[in-house]
Amino acid sequence: MDQHSPPAIWGEFVAAVFALPGVVEGHSAVSPASSRAVHVDGVDAPSEPGRSLAPMGERFEPVHLHGVEDTSLHLVLPPIRGAELVELGWAEPHQYEDHGTEFLLYGPRDATELQVIVDIVRESLLWSVSHLGREA
């Protein structure tokens, strides 16, 4: 938690996330104003608890990126996969988890970590909509 992404790496990370197919940038329903929500095009609301960070009735938000002063992110993943990432030191359970699917990931510190975290975000997006019979 005391190691943050360098500003240039964080900027590359944010750009890479919002360049993913089907991703729409927006305001987070649950995170401070400096955060950026990652929405999925065509998915307006969560249809199943635990697949979105936002509560039922709010816009579908499987991921949000915290501001440059923090450089962490929250996302949803299957509980077993999230536990693997916790064990590997990439994540920790979200402090306000309700479903065991909410995790905090640390921001990337270099180009290698940047690619790993983008891949985990992609994994989160795919899992978050998999129950809908579609891909992010």
Image (cartoon, rainbow, N blue to C red):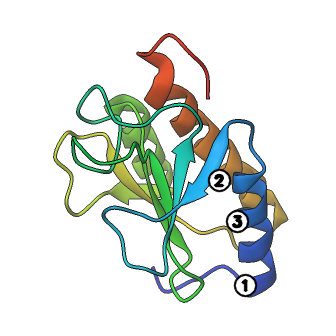
- Residue 85 at what x, y percent from top left? 47, 46
Q: Is residue 111 above or below residue 8?
A: above
Residue 22 locus on image (x, y percent): 68, 36
Q: Quadrant of residue 111?
A: bottom right
Amino acid type assigned to the residue bearing label 3 in the image: Val
Is the N terminus in the top left, top right, bottom left or bottom right quadrant?
bottom left
Graded by Cα atoms within 10 Å as few (under 14), some (14 to 19) or many (20 or more), the crowding at tag 1 reads some
User: What is the secondary structure assignment of the residue under circle 1?
Assistant: loop
* x, y percent for residue 102: 32, 48
- Residue 18 position in % (x across, y down): 71, 54
Mark 3 burial class by Cα count in 10 Å: few <14, some 14-19, many 20+: some
Q: Which residue is mark 3?
A: 14
Left or right: 81 in relation to 69: left
The numbered disc on residue 63 is: none
Which quadrant of the rendered structure holds the C terminus? top right
Q: Which amino acid, mark 1?
A: Pro
Q: Which residue in the structure is indicated by mark 1?
A: 6
Residue closest to the eye, 132 or 9: 132
Furthest residue toward top: 133
Query: Which amino acid type is shown beneath numbered disc 2?
Result: Ile
Q: Are marks 1 and 2 in contact (CB under 8 Å)?
A: no
Using the image, determine if residue 114 lies above or below residue 110. Answer: above
The dot on residue 117 is 2
Alpha carbons under labels 1 and 2: distance apart: 14 Å
The foreground one among 20 and 10 is 20
